[in-house]
Image (tube, rainbow, N blue to C red):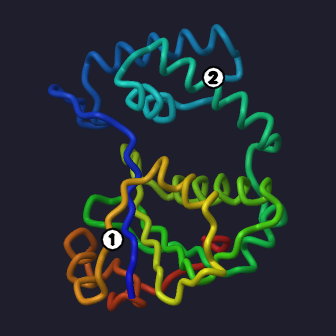
Amino acid sequence: METVQQAQENGGQGMIKDEENNSTAEEQHKLSLMRALVERRDPASKEVDDSTLRRFLRARDLDVEKAAAFFLKYLKWRTTFVPNGHISDAEVQNEIAQNKMFIGGADKKGRPILVVFGCRHFQNPDPDEFKRVVVYCLDKICSRMPAGQEKFVSIGDLQGWGFSNSDIRGYLAALSILQIVFVDDSKLKSTLLEDIDESQLPDTYGGKLPLVPLQEA
């Protein structure tokens, strides 16, 4: 079996940090500037918390103008694509029916764990539903992040994967946002245990925690 371990990367590091949100004084100042800017351009931004804005700011190396433009573009897209504020199970029922996405525990850094079984994935003829399930999945996993955490870990299990599971569109979307590490079967458990306690490691990989279907998390 071959698996892919993925960790979302979202931000930079500072030198003098606030213990509560892991940010520097400079970052806090720029966050205030960014909030004032985006709220002036789109009043709907007032509903967005500082943690979300901070992720966009860090993604643009604390460049306020670039981060604000990036965030406002995202906000416009989300308002159009997710008009109800969230994706319901009914809107991604074909993807859920494949029973391929599960929630695990958390790694040693408190990052929630997502497990996806590649052999159960089949390209969706409806590209909009595929996009919706990406949003659905990210919303689910991000809702489990503790305060101050901005990353998650995803294990993409490729055991049994074949040509029928190939989905170039989906892979390119994943590669654009995720850091990927391929793990050989013989080193799978030991590699995962470097970052995940056995009590939090999914039982399917030799750990003690049962997986929970994403839609039930």
Label 1 secondary element: strand
Q: Is residue 45 left or right of residue 117?
A: right
For disc 2, the marked residue is 72
Q: What residue did someone put label 1 on?
A: 182
Name the residue rendered at 76%, 67% in the picture: 124
Q: Which residue is painted at 33% across and 87% down in the image?
A: 207
Residue 126: x, y in percent?
Answer: 83, 61
Mark 2 residue type: Leu
Three-letter code for the amino acid on which mark 1 is drawn: Phe
Please tell me in which quadrant of the rendered image residue 216 appears. bottom right
Are the residues at dot 2 and dot 1 in contact (C-beta closer than 8 Å)?
no
Q: Which mark is residue 45?
A: none
Q: Position of residue 31 (x, y in %)?
A: 42, 19
Q: Nearer the viewer, residue 105 or 13?
A: 13
- Compare marks 2 and 1 and give the one earlier in the sequence: 2
- Real-space Cα distance between discs 2 and 1? 35 Å
Say few, some or many: other residues with alpha carbon within 10 Å of mark 1 (under 14 / 14 to 19 / 20 or more).
Answer: few
Which residue occupies 23% across, 76% down?
191
In screen coordinates, is 14 left or right of 137?
left
**Closer to the camera: disc 2 or disc 1?**
1
- Residue at disc 2, secondary structure: helix
Where is 81 relative to 23, above or below? below
Task: Work out whether 148 lies above or below 159.
Answer: above
| Residue at 61% over, 78% down | 100
